[in-house]
Image: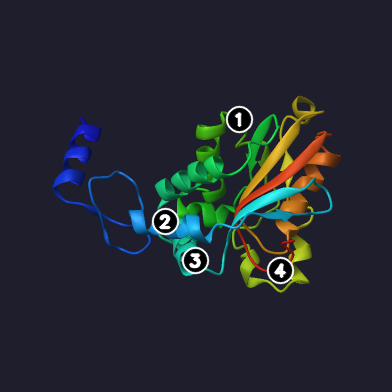
Amino acid sequence: MYHIMRRAVIHLIPLPCACCGDPVVHSAEPLCAGCWGALHLAASPKRIQISFAGDGTAWLPYGTPTVKRCMAAIKFRGLDTLAVALGRVMAQNLARPTVDALVPIPLAASRLYVRGYNQAERLAHGLHQVWGIPLASDLLIRPNAGWFTPKQSARSEADRSKIYGAYDVRDRERWAGARLALVDDTFTTGSTLNAAAEVCIKKAKVAEVIPLTLAYTARRAT
């Protein structure tokens, strides 16, 4: 009944685009056609490299206005449905990796509490819907993360190295020899992904790790 009523409301009163605020006419999509088009025009997949993983891919350059607004919407405005939709579109535009599971980077407890969801997990869910690759949301954990953990974006590049040792893995024997794709929202220096990849390689004895991110900044993307 809810979905029937929601579709009826959408046709009667168009919902605002999560990015620009313009009406999304006759559609359950979170973005208007113009913003979807702007994302596709902005898309410029980049190879990303970190020490403990194979070559991965980041889809969108963070510097474009539409990408910035979408990232703000999924991280600070509670639009988890947009994160899932972006994950689906990302999967439709990138080659399907040969991996056994999609592993989202976990959030610190404080941000998960405030946000109500992990945007990396929502992105991974969208990838899963298109690629059909199993989603392993509980593989990585952050056992030592304090309640007030500083955001990575707020740290200097030198301070980012402190995240090493922040992750652990559950069911280590289960993932021995597996190939995993680590999923995060943004690639900047790669320290977060590298710390997670390191624990997967050293503790879970996985065979290979591939990083995947929705967006990337100019630094360290090649």
Check disc 1 and report the residue beneath it. Answer: 133
Check disc 3 and report the residue beneath it. Answer: 68
Give how far across and how far down residue 199 sits, in percent: 80, 44
Mark 1 crowdedness (10 Å alpha carbons): few <14, some 14-19, many ≥20: some
Lower sequence index among marks 1 and 4: 1
Lower sequence index among marks 3 and 1: 3
CA–CA distance between discs 3 and 1? Answer: 28 Å
Pick the quarter of the image with the C terminus.
bottom right
At numbered mark 4, what does the secondary structure look like: helix, strand or loop?
A: loop
Lower sequence index among marks 1 and 2: 2
Lower sequence index among marks 3 and 4: 3
Residue drawn at the location 27% of the way across and 45% of the way down: 27
Residue drawn at the location 20% of the way across and 32% of the way down: 4
Quarter location, residue 205: top right
Look at label 4 and name its amino acid.
Answer: Arg
Give how far across and how far down residue 113 sits, in percent: 49, 53
At numbered mark 1, what does the secondary structure look like: helix, strand or loop?
A: loop
Residue drawn at the location 61% of the way across and 65% of the way down: 151
Contact? badges 2 and 4 (CB < 8 Å)? no
Give how far across and how far down residue 214 sits, in percent: 58, 53
Look at label 3 and name its amino acid.
Answer: Lys
Between 18 and 152, which is closer to the camera in this rendering? Answer: 18
Check disc 4 and report the residue beneath it. Answer: 219
Pick out the residue farthest to the top: 174
Pick the quarter of the image with the N terminus.
top left
